[in-house]
Image (cartoon, grey):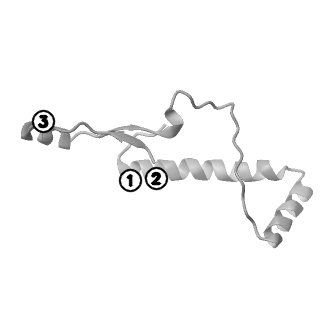
Amino acid sequence: MPKMSIKSPKNVEDFIQAAGQQADTTFPWDEPKVRDDVMKLISLRLSEPYMLKLQWISEQTGKAQQKMLKDLVIPWIDEQVKKLSETNGSDVK
């Protein structure tokens, strides 16, 4: 969830003026400490048949299971972030 900082208006005029402005949104992946070269590991639970199917596809194509899943998941993540940011009126990178 993005961190949002909204300044509280001091009077009615400030409130009305602030109503038309977007909140300053900082997404977690935009933080200065986040690095593209650091890889993080997540676990994925699959039923045994799907694990065997994934292994079979990997053997048939010569592609690593991690690479296949990464190639599928990353575009989906970017698409979801774009959709959600458009819905929330945020400018996402």
For numbered disc 1, what is the local secondary structure? helix
Viewer-side residue, 55 vs 63: 55
Please rate how many residues cluster around mark 3, counting C-alpha atoms within 10 Å: few if below 14, some from 14 to 19, many from 20: few
Numbered circle sitting on residue 87: 1
Q: Residue at image x 70%, y 38%?
A: 39
- Residue 46 image-quadrant placement: bottom right
User: Residue 20 or 29: which is nearer the viewer?
Assistant: 29
Badge 2: few (under 14), some or many (20 or more) residues near its Cα, within 10 Å?
A: few
* Residue 15, quarter of the rendered image: top left
Asked if residue 50 is positioned above or below residue 20 in the image, the reply reads below
Q: Residue at x 42, y 48 (%)?
A: 85
SS of the residue under disc 2: helix
Viewer-nearest of discs 2 and 3: 3
Q: Residues within 10 Å of mark 1 (few under 14, many from 20)?
A: few
Determine the residue positioned at 45% across, 48% down.
1
Residue 12 is situated, as x and y percent measured from the top left of the image, at: 7, 41
| Left or right of residue 2: residue 63 | right
The secondary element bearing badge 3 is classed as loop
* Distance from Cα at disc 2 to Cα at disc 1: 6 Å
Q: Which mark is residue 83?
A: 2
